[in-house]
Image: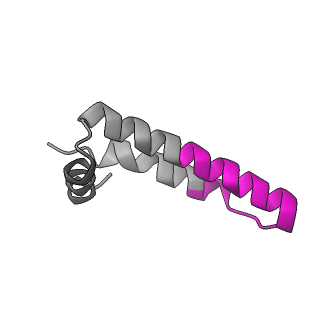
Amino acid sequence: MPAADFARYTAATAARDGEVRTAARESRQWSRELSAEAVGRWAVRVPRRLHEQIAELPAADRPG
């Protein structure tokens, strides 16, 4: 997660570092679940690599 986004989120929610990371991880999981549901309902395809790239972002952009 880019440092500016991290700072904005923690300022808006008063969340601590671990809480932000947990929320981001859960959000990604929910996104995958929604994508899977869309595939089942409407035959929408989301590239697997897109999910992998999104999952890699928090590790690549740790603040500080």
Coloring applied to the structure: one colour
> Could you tell whether 2 is left or right of 25 in the image?
left
Q: Quadrant of the C terminus?
A: top left
- Residue at horizontal 80 percent and vertical 60 percent from the top: 39
From this view, report whether residue 18 is shown above or below residue 4: above
Residue 29, image x, y percentages: 58, 43
- In front: 62, or 31? 31
Q: Nearer the viewer, residue 4 or 57?
A: 4
Which secondary structure is most common in the magenta stretch?
Answer: helix
Q: Outermost residue, top direction?
A: 18
Q: What segment carries the magenta color?
A: 28-50
Asked if 19 appears above or below 2 in the picture, the reply is: above
Q: Residue furthest front?
A: 13
In the rendered image, which quarter is residue 21 located in? top left
Q: Is residue 58 above or below residue 2?
A: above
Q: In the image, 29: left or right of 61?
A: right
Task: Give the residue at x 24% y 54%.
Answer: 12
Quadrant of the image occupied by residue 48? bottom right
Taking the spot 28% from the left edge, 53% from the top edge, the residue there is: 9
Q: Position of residue 19 (x, y in %)?
A: 33, 35
Whole-percent x, y for residue 16 in the image: 24, 35
Q: Residue at x 75, y 64 (%)?
A: 45
Q: Position of residue 57 (x, y in %)?
A: 39, 50
Q: How many marks?
A: 0
Q: Residue 51: say if magenta.
A: no
Reply yes or no: does residue 46 show up in magenta.
Answer: yes
